[in-house]
Structures are given as C-alpha cells and as structure tokens.
Image (cartoon, rainbow, N blue to C red):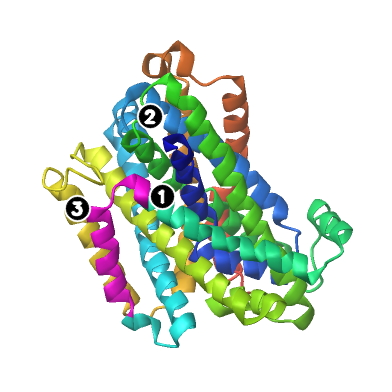
Amino acid sequence: MKRVFGLFLGIVTAFGGFIDIGDLVADAQVGARFGLSLAFVTVVAVVIIMCFAEMSARIAIATRRAAFDVVRERLGPKAGLAGLAASFTVTAMLVMAELSGVALALELATSVNHLLFIPVLAVVAFLIVWKLPFEPLEILFGVLGLATLVWLVAITHLAPDWGSLLHGATHPSLPHGEGLPTMLFFAISLLGAQATPYETFFFSSGAVEQGWTSKKSLPDMRANVLMGFPLGGLLAIAIQTASMLVLAPRGISVQHLSDSVSPIAYSLGKLGLAVAILAVFAVTFGATMETLMSTAFITAHFFGWSWGVIGRQFRSSRFYALIIAVLVGAVLFALTTIDPIKVTIYAVVLSSVTLPVTFLPLLIVGNDRRVMGSTLVNGKLANTVGSLSMLVVIPAALLALPLLVATKAGMG
C-alpha cells in the first residue's frame, strides 16, 4: 500500500507543473488561437521534464542529498548562485500567481472578490507546510487533482471528429491572421510552463523526504515519472482541445481563468463546471505548495541550511522563515491588484530562459561517476535525451525575451 501511495508524488508533481494557473490559461489560449498545432510542444516538454526529473531523483538516490546541493558542490558556488537567483525569482513569481489562482477558483464558486481570500489562503498554506508530512499532502492533492479528468469527459461529450483532431495535432500549421513570431512565443511559453525547472528541485527533495536512498527505490521513482508527467501532458492537450472545439469557432479569446473553464460549462453544464472549479482549486493549491516549498528547498540546499517538511521545524528555522517571507511577499504583490495571469505569462517566459542553467548542471553531475557510481551514472538513453533536450531549450532561452517584447507577450 505504501508503494501505491508513493505514486501520488509523480501525480501531484505533474499537476503542479503541467496544470496550474498559467497552464490553464496558456493551454486555453493556444487551443483557441492555434488549435492543436502546438500540441507537439507539450509532447516535447513531457519528454524533457521526464528526463531531468528522473535524473535529479537519481542524483538524490546516489548521494542521499538533493540535486541542487550536489550541483553547488560539484560545479562551485558561482555557478550554483546563478542558477539559484534565476530559479528563485521565477518560482517566487509563480507562488504569487498560484496563490491568486486558488483565490480565483474560490471567486468562481462564491462570487466573492478573490483578493479577500488571498491572506487567508497564505496562512492555510503555511500551516499545511508546517504540520503535514509529504505523504498526506501528495494523497490529498493527487486525489482532488483527478477532477481535471473532467476536460477529457467534456471532449468526449462534444463528440468531435477524432481523425480531424489527430490530423491537426500531427500537421502543425499557422492559422490565418496569426504571425509566426506570435506562434513561436506561445510555443516557448508552453515549454517554460510545462518543463518547469522547479519541478526537478521539488522531485529531488521529495525523493530525499520519501527515503529513496538506494537502488531499490529506482522502480518506484521511475513509476512516478512514467505515470505522472504523461498524465499532466495529456490533460494539457485536453485543455487545448476543449478550447479549440468550443472557443475557436465563436471567436472567443481567453483573458481570464473563467474563460478556461467555459468549455466545460458549455459541454457538461453546471455539474461539469462545479467539477472543473474543484479541479482548478486542487491543481492551483497543489502548485502553490510545490512552488512555495521549492523556493525554500533550493535556497536551503545552496546555503547548507537544515531543511525538511515535517519533524524538523525548530531545527530548520531559516527554512521556515524563508517560506513565511515568500508568502508575505506573494500576498503583498497580489494585493496590488496586478493581473495574476499576466504575472504568470511573464514567469513562464522567464522560466524558459532558466532552463539551460537548470538542466545542463544536472546533465554534468549525472555523468560524473565519482558522484553517481558505476550503476547510477547516466546511461546512453539519458544522455541522448538530455543532449537533444539542450538543443531545444538553449534556442528557446535565447529567443524568449526578444519574442516577449516583439509580440507584446503574445498580444501583438
């Protein structure tokens, strides 16, 4: 039974990385504007994040330490500090966006302004981190996150031409009225949102917390990777498909979270909408916890602080003080009434910029036999996929900011 419960780590990680406030809107935008022409980006992102999440967890198993800690020691503090600064900035922005996403879900359910919920949700988030160990957290949000399957049900209920959908996904084309730079911008945004760097830190830290410290843990770890991330990718494509079927024919553009769930209401009515709102709440709250803990994990690993989610609160005072500081900053930022959707778009674009400085160090450490040993060092498959991934993320990182400016964040 413990092994079955352990699989929820992969599921909740996939939901946090693929289906969060940014992805709910980005996938809906892509589906409404480009149909399934960018579905291949999600497939590529799934392969990339599977490769490096598995690598980061394998580093944790080999060293019994989180991957970022090992990277800092192996490559030196300067290289580690660059990665820390970039990852912390992006992930802290996402904490604010995810927290706002939970509040927006509650606004959809109650019609109460979402800003009123944000301070309360921040307190709840801290209490959960303070009191709950990893396993109940994984199970809770893993189960609730399964409500996202409502998008698959909605698509089936719409009875589309499946052959046409497959053709659209396998034959990308530039829709009439859209420019190539805009399409490239959304492709890079999807990559940054779905191959998220913080997932590798969270997954590696989770491996240590779960006690994955021997080769016997490899099957469980790889089962998490093989189940969780593809499920997240499937749900992302489902959101794109639902928007293509419902929003695109009506010329509806996605400007708000409510636009992302409107295809569910159209297909399944009020009951479907209620399930969709529950799904949004679950995945954004799960992503809030994941991003929040990731900011503290990577900082604690770099500076050598004591860290942990349960049982070490008073010995990990700096770890929890940082969590409080990030939450307070997120609340204050959100209460300025800045649009959380825009913040998320900028965050995922910046995330794509940080992909090379996150993944390349993992690839280097994964090939170091002194660190990994002869049995856990990267094999041919990991090195091939990892190297090909770098050929994707490096050009994406170089193009991200110029395209952000040139397309006015996809609105130009």
Structural crowding at the residue carrying mark 3, measured as other residues with C-alpha within 10 Å and reported as few (<14), some (14–19) or many (≥20): many
| x, y percent for residue 123 | 24, 68
Q: Amino acid at mark 1?
A: Glu
Q: Please name the residue shown 52% across and 73% down the image.
A: 277
Residue 182 visible in the shown view: no
Which of marks 1 and 2 precedes in the sequence?
Answer: 1
Q: Amino acid at mark 3?
A: Tyr
Structural crowding at the residue carrying mark 1, measured as other residues with C-alpha within 10 Å and reported as few (<14), some (14–19) or many (≥20): many
Q: Quadrant of the N terminus?
A: top left
Residue 141 visible in the shown view: yes
**Side of 84 relative to 141 (left or right):** left
**Side of 30 relative to 160 (left or right):** left
Compared with 390, 11 (above or below) is: below
Q: Could you tell me how far apart the alpha carbons at marks 1 and 3 are, in whole angstroms?
A: 20 Å
| x, y percent for residue 203 | 42, 41
Q: Quadrant of the C terminus?
A: bottom right
Kindly state the secondary structure of the residue where label 1 is placed. Answer: helix
Query: Start and end of the magenta stretch?
Result: 117-136
| Callouts 3 and 2 close, C-beta under 8 Å | no
Q: Please name the residue shown 70% across and 80% down the image.
A: 266
Residue 320 numbered tag:
3
Q: Could you tell me how far apart the alpha carbons at marks 2 and 1 are, in whole angstroms?
A: 16 Å
Residue 156 numbered tag:
none
Kindly state the secondary structure of the residue where label 2 is placed. Answer: loop
| x, y percent for residue 314 | 11, 47
Structural crowding at the residue carrying mark 2, measured as other residues with C-alpha within 10 Å and reported as few (<14), some (14–19) or many (≥20): many
Residue 212 numbered tag:
2
Q: Amino acid at mark 2?
A: Trp
Q: Which residue is mark 1?
A: 138
Compared with 213, 317 (above or below) is: below
Which of marks 2 and 3 precedes in the sequence?
Answer: 2
Of the two numbered discs 3 and 2 in the rendering, the one whose residue sits closer to the viewer: 2
